[in-house]
Image (cartoon, rainbow, N blue to C red):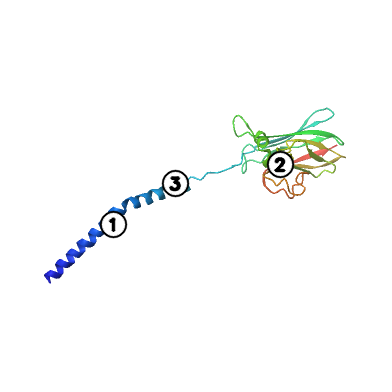
Amino acid sequence: MQHCCVFILHLRQLIFLNLFMMIKINFPIVLLLGLAFVFTACDKEDPVIANEEELITTLKYTLTPTNGGTSIELSFVDLDGDGGNAPVITGGTLSANQSYSGTLDLLNEAESPAESIAAEVAAEDKEHQFFFASTVNGVTVTYDDQDADGNPLGLQTTLTTGGAGTGTLTVVLRHEPNKSAAGVVEGGIENAGGETDIEVSFPIDVQ
């Protein structure tokens, strides 16, 4: 009985010694695996947001008669962004059978000084395009500028009116549209795809 107890004691010591040696030998590997997990976890909790869109608080569409006269400014202002107060939209009265040179300006007036989003659109012209549509018969908009590939952009345009009428003029800025899709270079938005950065409908009266 005494010999049996001594044998069991020696066996326990041998098992403990082997376990200790295994842990000691593999400790560097365990440590490296632990560090790798820590760094990986840190990376996952700190994502990089690419191409975050800028806030557009203000859109101004200035229309100047090509034969001279007073300019008309259509404007959209929403200084507190989505979910706050309703935007202030100002339309205008246009002359019938007239041609206007149109200039679009986009701003982020939440910044001080105001940040020019139009300058960013111009710098990334291949990734943007404006689209125009009116419910007033005879009102059309054509492009006067192009991107680096020769496709339309829309910061500079010509607006032409027909007969008298009342309705809306809608301006849409698309990000990453498919400019090679059918009808897009002619100003058709149906096949453009992409994401809408801003869309505004202005009330207009053609007299």
Q: Secondary structure at mark 3?
A: helix
Asked if one can make out residue 130 in the rendered structure from this viewpoint, the answer is yes
To which residue does mark 3 refer? 42
The residue closer to the viewer here, 159 or 29, is 29
| x then y, percent, for residue 107 | 65, 34
Q: Residue furthest bottom?
A: 1
Q: Residues within 10 Å of mark 1 (few under 14, many from 20)?
A: few
The residue closer to the viewer here, 91 or 31, is 31
Amino acid type at circle 1 is Met
Task: Please state if 98 lies on the left or on the right of 81 as rendered.
Answer: right
Real-space Cα separation, disc 3 to disc 1, in angstroms: 30 Å
Q: Which label is found at residue 22?
A: 1
The residue closer to the viewer here, 115 or 148, is 148
Contact flag, marks 3 and 1 (Cβ < 8 Å): no
The residue closer to the viewer here, 187 or 98, is 187
To which residue does mark 2 refer? 129
90 up-or-down from 7: above or below: above
